Image (cartoon, helix red, strand yellow):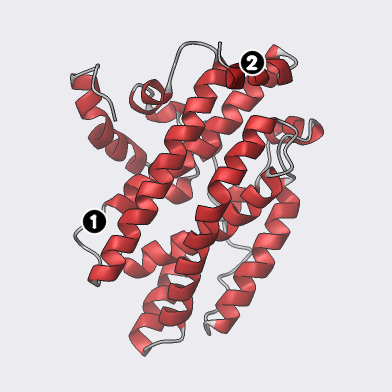
Amino acid sequence: MNEKQSKTEVEIKSESLRADLFEYLLRLGDDRLVLGHRLSEWCGHGPILEEDIALANVALDFIGQAEYILGLAGEVEGAGRDADRLVYFREAIDYRNLKLVELPRGDFAFTIARQFLFDVYDVELMTALLESSFQPLADVAAKVLKEARYHLRHSRRWVLKLGDGTEESHQRLQKALNEIWMYSGEIFQPDDVDRRLWDEKMAPDLEELGERWKREVEGVLEEATLELPDPDQYMAEGGRQGRHTEHLGHLLSEMQILPRSYPDAKW
């Protein structure tokens, strides 16, 4: 057992807490894995060469973060599953990502709208996790936060450029925001896993995070001359509990076919 594993074992006080931590790490890792996959679909299709490269780099950042976080999840679980096993040999119902990240990539405006909403959340989350009482999770935040801030600068710049750009770019981004808004509420819907980890000071209060997210998003949308979508509309939910859209199954079948056909393959 190495030093990192020893530290992890010492800080997990009970099997129920271990289960909660495993679940929480799956959520963090699955969000990044699925969103990274969606962004990778832009490779070779970006609107300009520079943006093609930028989106590919952001996709690689998310997939690298997913490998790190899911590797830690495997250590916490202690059942012998590494990142590869967790990525390639789970069914859609076992994935814990937000529905927001599994939706098809759409056009460029849709991708930017989704990315901006997620990036604001990611920066707030990782900043809060720096104070996690579970040191491996604080280490994850320190590793991810710099990339998260870069991602937000990138998507924020595009929201301002498209929103306050031409009539067509404004309309297309507003349409994308209106379509995707119903998937934003799930980000800040806490469940018992979240609440138990709050009590242990291992994870932040999602409701407080949501207030900061809302202020940042509203400010940027106003600057971009965009309208905030109806806040009282129906909000999708269930991704954290394994209830996904049909799109995740298609994504996983594409991503998992090689290692399931050749189980010894490595990513």
Amino acid type at circle 1 is Cys
Q: Position of residue 178 (x, y in %)?
A: 48, 68
Earlier along the polypeptide chain: callout 1 or callout 2?
2
Say which quarter of the image contains residue 16: top right
Q: Residues within 10 Å of mark 1 (few under 14, many from 20)?
A: some
Residue furthest to the right? 199
Decide which of 118, 57 is in the foreground and name it: 57
The residue carrying mark 2 is 6
Amino acid type at circle 2 is Ser
From the image, which quarter does the N terminus lie in? top right
From the image, which quarter does the C terminus lie in? top left
Which marked residue is nearer to the observer: mark 1 or mark 2? 2
Q: Vertical placement of 1 versus 223: above or below? A: above
Q: How many marks?
A: 2
Residue 225 placement, left or right of 264: right
The residue carrying mark 1 is 43
Say which quarter of the image contains residue 95: top left
Residue 17 placement, left or right of 149: right
Q: Position of residue 59 (x, y in %)?
A: 36, 51
Q: Vertical placement of 173 versus 15: above or below? A: below
Q: Residue at x 23, y 22 (%)?
A: 265
**What is the secondary structure assignment of the residue under circle 1?**
loop
Mark 1 → mark 2, Cα distance in angstroms? 40 Å
**What is the secondary structure assignment of the residue under circle 2?**
helix
Q: Residue at x 35, y 21 (%)?
A: 89
Q: Residue at x 51, y 33 (%)?
A: 69
